[in-house]
Amino acid sequence: MHEVARLAGVSHTTVSRYLQDKNALKPQTRIKVEYAVKALDYRPNLVARSMRTRRSNRLAIVLATGPHFPGRQLAAASETAHQAGYQLEIVSVEGGPKARAARIEDLARSGQVDGILAISSIDLKTKSLGIPLVQSESYDERLHVLGKLAGAAEIAEIIEYLCSLGHRRFLHVAGDQSFTSGRNRKRVYLETIERLGLESVGVYDGDWSGQSGVDAITALPEDCGVTAVVAACDLAALGVMRGARARGWSVPRDLSVFGWDDDEYGRFALPSLSTVAVDRESQGRDAIHRLLAEIHCTPAPEPSTRTVNRLIHRESTAPPPLSADVTGADGRSEAQ
Amino acid sequence: MHEVARLAGVSHTTVSRYLQDKNALKPQTRIKVEYAVKALDYRPNLVARSMRTRRSNRLAIVLATGPHFPGRQLAAASETAHQAGYQLEIVSVEGGPKARAARIEDLARSGQVDGILAISSIDLKTKSLGIPLVQSESYDERLHVLGKLAGAAEIAEIIEYLCSLGHRRFLHVAGDQSFTSGRNRKRVYLETIERLGLESVGVYDGDWSGQSGVDAITALPEDCGVTAVVAACDLAALGVMRGARARGWSVPRDLSVFGWDDDEYGRFALPSLSTVAVDRESQGRDAIHRLLAEIHCTPAPEPSTRTVNRLIHRESTAPPPLSADVTGADGRSEAQ
DNA sequence: CTGAAAGCGCTTACAG
DNA sequence: CTGAAAGCGCTTACAG
C-alpha cells in the first residue's frame, strides 16, 4: 500500500480511503490512485484489514466429514453469501457433535469469521460465542414446535397417494435416527399410518444406506402382505428394489417403492424411482439468509424451503396387485 | 491476552511464549499462566497472529460450484491438512476457469492462506502468486507426459477384460471433454481399441450425465452389432442400461456395460454395475501432500493414486450373445 | 527465564 | 478533501 501511495504521490491514508469509497476523493486524486493501484496490481491484505475492522466478511459453515457432501446446498449457500459481500468457508470436521462444537468455539474466537452455520448436529455447552451461530438442526426442531415439522407434508402426501392407489400395508425404511430429518420422517410416517387407519408392518431402522433397504426387505416374513415401502432416501429405496428382486417380487407390480431426495440416478434406475424433490438450493439460501439476519440484527426472514419440496411420480409406484386387496397376506405367492 | 497476563501476574510477552512453547517457561510461571488461560478460556486471535507471523496455517482448495462435490477427496484432504497442522478452506467459485483464476489471485494476495490447491481447471495469466499453487489438472497432464496417463491402465484393463469375454465391437460414452479425465479416458479407449485390433462403432461425446448414456444408445443403428459399452462414469453407464432396456436389449445378456467411479448406487442397480473403484481418499491426500511439499520446499512426494484404482466386476458384464460371434451385426434381432 | 519495545498492514477518528 | 497519528492483538528480536 505504501508503494501505491508513493506512486500516486499521496498518503497511504488516501489510498485506504480510495479502497473504501472511490467517491470520497477529489476526482484528480482518485485518478492518480486508480492508476497506481492498477499499475501495481495492488490488492489489500485482508488479514490486516480484518484485524483493524474486527470484521472479516467471512462466514463458516461447519459440517461432518463423510462421503455425502451436501454439494447443492453448499453451492447455493456460497452464492448467497457472495451476493451479500461475504466469502463462505466450508469447514468439514472429523468426529462427532463434540468435535464440531469445539471447532465452532475456536472459530468464533479466532476472529476469522463473522458468523457460523452448523448444518450437522453439535454438542455445544457455551452459550455465547461472541458471534452469531445458526443451527440447521435446531431450525428443524423449531419448525416442529411450530407445528410445521420439516418434511411432514411430503411423507403424509406419499402415504395418502399410495393409499389412494389402494395400498393398505406399509413398511418404512427409516434413516439414521441421530439425524433430525431421519427422526422426523419416521415420526410422520407413524402418525400418518395411524391417522388414516392403515397398517404398518413396522419400521426398519436404517442408516440411509442402500444395504439398509436390502436388509429391510430381506427381514420381511414371506406372508407380511406389504405392498408399499416408504424409504427415507433414494439410496435405501434402491436397496429395497434390489431386495425385492432377490425375493422374486417385482417392482412396481408386487411392491411400490417411494424414495426421497430426487438423486440423479433415480431417474435412470430400473424402474425409475418415485421420490421427493428437495429444494436444496433453497435450503442453502435460507440458512445463509438467517445467519446474515442475525449478523445484521434484522428480523429473521421467512424460510422458503417448506413450500418447495414436491413429489415426483415415476415407475416404481403403481396400484397394489389385485390379490392384495382380496387375500391380504399371500397375494404374491405366485411371483415366487 | 492482557487479561490473562494480568491474572497470571506476568507480561503478555510471557503469555505469548507460553502459547508457542509451554516448556520455554519456568515451571512455576507456566503453572500460573496455564491456570489463567484455563480460567479465562482464552483463545488467541488468529487474525492478529497471522498478521504478525505472515502465516495463516490455512490452505484453500478452489473448485467449481455444482452438484457434484467431490466429497470424499475433500474429506481426506481436510484430514491430511489437519494432521499437518493446517486448516483447509473449501472455496467453491461460480463461473468458469477465468473466475476461478481471479479468485485464486485474490486469495493469494489476501494473506489468508499459505497455499492453494486448484482441483478444477483454471485460466491463470499471472505466473507468480507469492504462495504455492498446486493444480490437479496440470498434474494429470504431467503424468501423461511421463507416460503414466491417469486412468490409462484401467480403461485398457476394462477393454482387455471384455475382449477376453469375447466382445469385439465397442462403444464409448465419453465424459465432458473439457475435463482432463474425460479426454484421457476417451484417448485411451481409442488407443486400446486400435492396439488390440478391435472395432469401435464410435465415441458418443457425453457430459457425465445419465441422459448422455440414454442418448448414446438411442442414437445407435439397430444393426450396429455393439456388445459392450465403456462409459466414462457410472451415471452415464446407468443411462446406457436404461437406454438398452428401452430398445429391448437386455443387460448383460445382449449388452455388457462398464462404468467408472464405484458410486454407491451402482452396487444396488439392477443389474449391479461393473465399475472402477477410484481411491478418492488417496487423491485428496496426495494433492495436499504435494501442496505441503511446495510450502515447505521439500521434494514432491510420490503419488499413490495411480496404483490403487481397481476394476470391480458385477452383474452388468458377461460374455456377448453367442450369435454376436457368428453373425456379427444382427445377432440380437430376436431380442426385439 | 522474563519484560519492554517495535512492528505486521490496515482503518479511522482527529486536525487542518 | 487530505494527512499524521493511534491502535487492532499478536510475535519476536533485543536487553537484562
Image (cartoon, coloured by chain):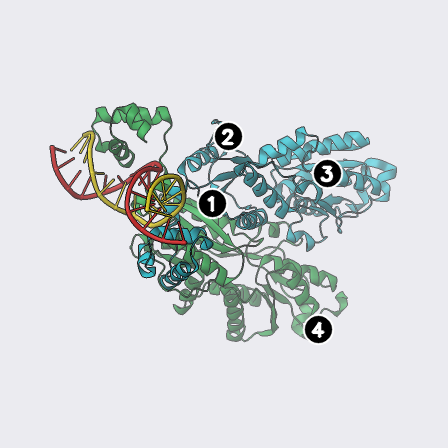
Chain colours: A green, B cyan, C red, D yellow
Establish if A317 lies above or below B215: below
Q: Amino acid at mark 3?
A: Ile
Q: Work out whether disc 2 and disc 1 sit on a shared chain.
A: yes
**Nearer to us: label 4 or label 2:** 2
- The chain that hosts pointer 4 is A
Estimate the x, y position of residue B220 in percent, counting from the top left. Answer: 71, 36
Q: Amino acid at mark 4?
A: Pro
Quadrant of residue B244 within the rendered picture: top right
Q: CA distance from mark 3 to mark 4?
A: 44 Å
Q: Of helix, strand and loop, which one carries label 3?
A: helix
Q: Which residue is mark 3?
A: B155
CB within 8 Å, label 4 to label 2? no
Establish if A31 lies above or below B26: above
Q: Is residue C9 left or right of residue B324?
A: left
Q: Is residue B83 visible?
A: yes
Quadrant of residue A126 within the rendered picture: bottom left
Q: Amino acid at mark 2?
A: Asp
Q: Amino acid at mark 1?
A: Asn
**Around disc 3, counting alpha carbons within 10 Å, would you say few (fewer than 14), some (14 to 19), or many (20 or more)?**
many
Mark earlier in primary sequence (2, 1): 1
Which label number is shown at residue A221? 4
Establish if B99 lies above or below A288: above
**Nearer to us: label 2 or label 1:** 1
Query: Residue B247 or B9: which is nearer the viewer?
Result: B9
